[in-house]
Image: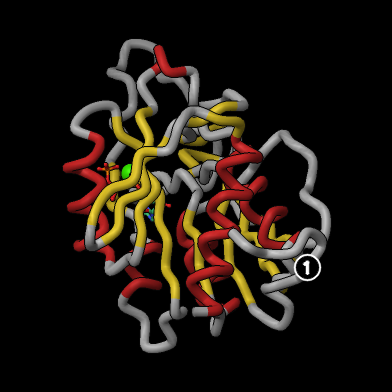
Amino acid sequence: EGLLAGAKPLAGRKAIVTSGPTHEPIDPVRYIANRSSGKQGHAIAAALARLGADVTLVCGPVAIPDPAGVQLVRVERAAEMRDAVVAALPADVAVMVAAVADWRVASAAGNKIKKRPGEAPPPLQLAENPDILKTIGHHASRPKLVIGFAAETENVAENGRAKLERKGADYIVANDVSPATGIMGGDRNRVKLIARDGIEEWPEMGKDDVADKLAALIAAKLLS
Ligand code: CTP
Ligand code: CA
């Protein structure tokens, strides 16, 4: 993008990135989770740091190494992730990559739920979690650039576009997470970059390359 190799175009700029799944407790020993590995979010945090940004990475429980050069905030639940992201404001750019659980258990049990012979299984009552991207997209201290992801298994472009509007994002990076794509948990990704004025289809590439391409776009936008 015309940037010199080794240059730090994001020096002095602050970035917030979310990554990984969230875990929503059912009781002290059980939780609701999803298949997010954290690979794409961690790669984006590392790519922004390589361009010189001061990066706060708020991440849910993951089993991958910590990226170099970022400030890591570890959380478990969506509500904790929201609090950590809001506490990290102000920022120049926010990239919300985490697969935030849409629902939590309405009231997690304080003690391990026991089987009761002869009785029906316990019902799980769910409550909707806060939408972190939407909170940031409409925040009084909204970063100049707000970028979300959209995990879809059908109608990827249409659903991604609707999320852009609803959540007040500048870009949505939409991907097809159907099991057959191998994207969830894998090392490669194929995304559509959705903006207000159109959609760009990126070829399939490694998650590290998606991260570098997105970081370059962020640098170009913030410096323009
Ligand atoms: N997101 C968020 N907080 C939530 C849910 C989602 O910040 N509670 C963010 C994700 O990090 C992602 C974007 O919103 O950047 C889209 O997430 P996605 O799960 O695709 O969208 P939802 O709005 O949850 O819609 P649905 O799961 O029903 O498709
Ligand atoms: Ca969701």
Circle 1 residues within 10 Å: few <14, some 14–19, many ≥20: few
**Mark 1 highlights which residue?**
7
Q: Quadrant of residue 75?
A: bottom right
Extreme-bottom residue of the structure = 140
- Which residue is at a point 79% across and 40% down the rendered structure image? 65
- Which residue is at a point 67% across and 67% down the rendered structure image? 56
- Which residue is at a point 40% across and 72% down the rendered structure image? 136
Residue 28 x %, y %: 58, 41
Residue 50 x %, y %: 76, 60
Amino acid beneath label 1:
Ala
Tell me if residue 50 comes above or below residue 30 in the rendering.
below
Residue 59 x %, y %: 62, 53
Tell me if residue 19 comes above or below residue 123 in the rendering.
below
- Which residue is at a point 72% across and 53% down the rendered structure image? 46
Numbered circles on residues, count: 1
Q: Nearer the viewer, residue 192 or 74?
A: 192
Q: Is residue 190 rendered to the left or right of residue 30?
A: left
- Tell me how the rendering is colored: secondary structure
Q: Quadrant of residue 200?
A: top left
Q: Is residue 55 visible?
A: yes
* Ligand 2 location (quadrant): top left
Q: Secondary structure at mark 1?
A: loop
Q: Nearer the viewer, residue 85 or 142?
A: 142
Residue 53 x %, y %: 70, 71
Q: Is residue 103 visible?
A: no
Q: Nearer the viewer, residue 68 or 199?
A: 199
Q: Quadrant of residue 170?
A: bottom left
